[in-house]
Amino acid sequence: MASVSGLGGFDSASLVDQLMQLEKVPQQRVQTRLSGEQLQLNALQTLNSKIASLVTKAEAAADPAKWGGRSATSTDPKVAVTAGASASPGSLSIKVERTALSHQLGFASTAARADVVVAGGTQVRLDRLDGTTKTIDTKDGTLQGLADALNDPANETGVRASLVSTTGGYRLLVESTTTGKASDFALTGAAGSALLGGATARAGQDAELSLGAGITTTSATNTFTDLLPGVTVTVAAGSAGTTSEVTVSRDEAGATKLVKDLVDGLNSVLTEMTGLTTYGTGTAGTGRGMLAGDSTVRSVQSQLRGTVFGSGDESLAKLGIQIDRNGAFTFNEADFKKAYTADPAGTAASISSGFASRVEKTADAASNKDTGLLTAAITGRKAGIERLTDSVEAWDRRLELRRTALTRQFTALETALSTMSSQSSWLSSQISALGSSSSS
């Protein structure tokens, strides 16, 4: 008996998926390139940020004002000293004869806080050393009301009042808010009568320093501004009798830090560049940098190293700055300090208007947000990434159309095969029927 079979039964969906994997290969190549471009863009942006930070450090070292600093020291912590750029280097022996005091009044009588202590009304009178008089209303004439009125900022009394707890009640202590002999004041009733049994005074006093050779100076506070041009001295309360040696010198540590920060910043950027541009070793390119072969980065790296060379006979080696065999900057602090001590102005000029200025210009030419070489490279990479992204999206559309077409074709084929299978089954049944008829 003859039969027809094997014309249908295949999985068209699986076959379409396999074909689409082949169709996606070109798009996957573009996606791989896009990923690599994005990584390179990130590396360029990170490098550009570091170089921009280097510009800031170079600007600081190139600023002549940064080189005018002075450091000031005192042999006794009770005598603090600060020095500005206008201060001249030198030393001074200071003896604290006395410190500044505020004027105080301690009243004799003890009272409860709610006791009325202002006779003949609610007002009191405050007389100052400068001859001015101020009338203050206590509202209720009580001890608490008097203290509150004296402390009320709206009354602008220039004093502060405290209620001190003692046996049998409270005593009033009033003190000027400023120090110095000019802080003197008197507090009485409105008509000049005594309050709370009268007061014991501690007179305000100016601070006084002895500078030797019969020279003394006073201040209403414990701070002596411009004791010497650009030098301010502050003495601690209770430091009377203290003697201190005050020394003002050029800020060698600050100058050294300016240069060290600049050199460290340079080396950080150069190390980053070396890692990004290395070609790698071996047939597999092991250790290949993200920007290997990037001529822009290599050019900037070379220019930064070239900042060590000045014009004419200028040499940074005598200032402790050199480049080693690996292309890294070195900084010998001892050599720099020696040069700075010998010639502060010349050393400062060699760095500020020389080395630091060259680094600033070179770094800015690379990282400037408008005209920088690396900025232009970043802009170019972004444009390339946009084009690749558009290409991937275009491939998505093409692949979707291709899948639709393949699905349609294989669906039609499967339908045709199904029809042929049905016809084959019918034909087989007819052949079987003819065979049965012949036998009979």
Image (cartoon, rainbow, N blue to C red):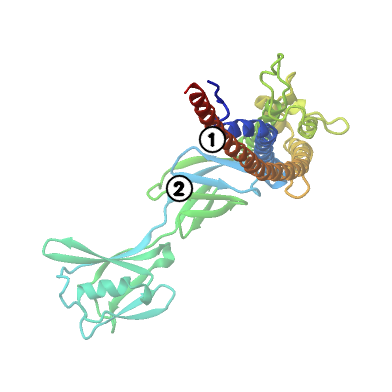
Q: Decide: few, some or many residues near mark 2? Use Cα within 10 Å; few <14, some 14-19, many ≥20.
A: many
SS of the residue at dot 2?
A: strand
416 and 30: which one is in front? 416
Q: Residue furthest left?
A: 168
Q: Nearer the viewer, residue 306 or 164?
A: 306
Circle 1 packing at 10 Å, graded few (<14), some (14-19), many (20+), is some
On the image, the x and y values in percent for residue 157 come to: 37, 73
Q: Quadrant of residue 313?
A: top right
Q: Is residue 145 above or below residue 314?
A: below
Q: Label 1 is placed on what type of residue?
A: Ser
Separation (CA) of disc 1 from disc 2: 120 Å
Tag 1 secondary structure: helix
Between 18 and 113, the one lying in front of the other is: 18
Q: Does any portion of residue 9 appear in the rendered image? A: no
93 to the left or right of 49: left
Instruction: Judge from the rendering whether residue 286 lies leftward or rightward of residue 133; answer left or right.
Output: right
Q: Which residue is mark 1?
A: 422
Question: Total number of numbered labels?
Answer: 2
Amino acid at circle 2: Val
Q: Choose the circle earlier in sequence order: 1 or 2.
A: 2
| Residue matched to label 2 | 96
In the rendered structure, the answer to whether residue 426 lies left or right of residue 138 reads: right
The percent coordinates of residue 364 (x first, y second) are 75, 43
Spot the residue most to the front: 440
**Residue 395 found in image quarter:** top right
Q: Residue at x 78, y 34 (%)?
A: 300
Kindly check if marks 1 and 2 are in contact, taking CB atoms under 8 A apart as contact. Answer: no
Q: Is residue 144 left or right of residue 381?
A: left
**Residue at the limit of the structure toward the top, as seen here:** 282
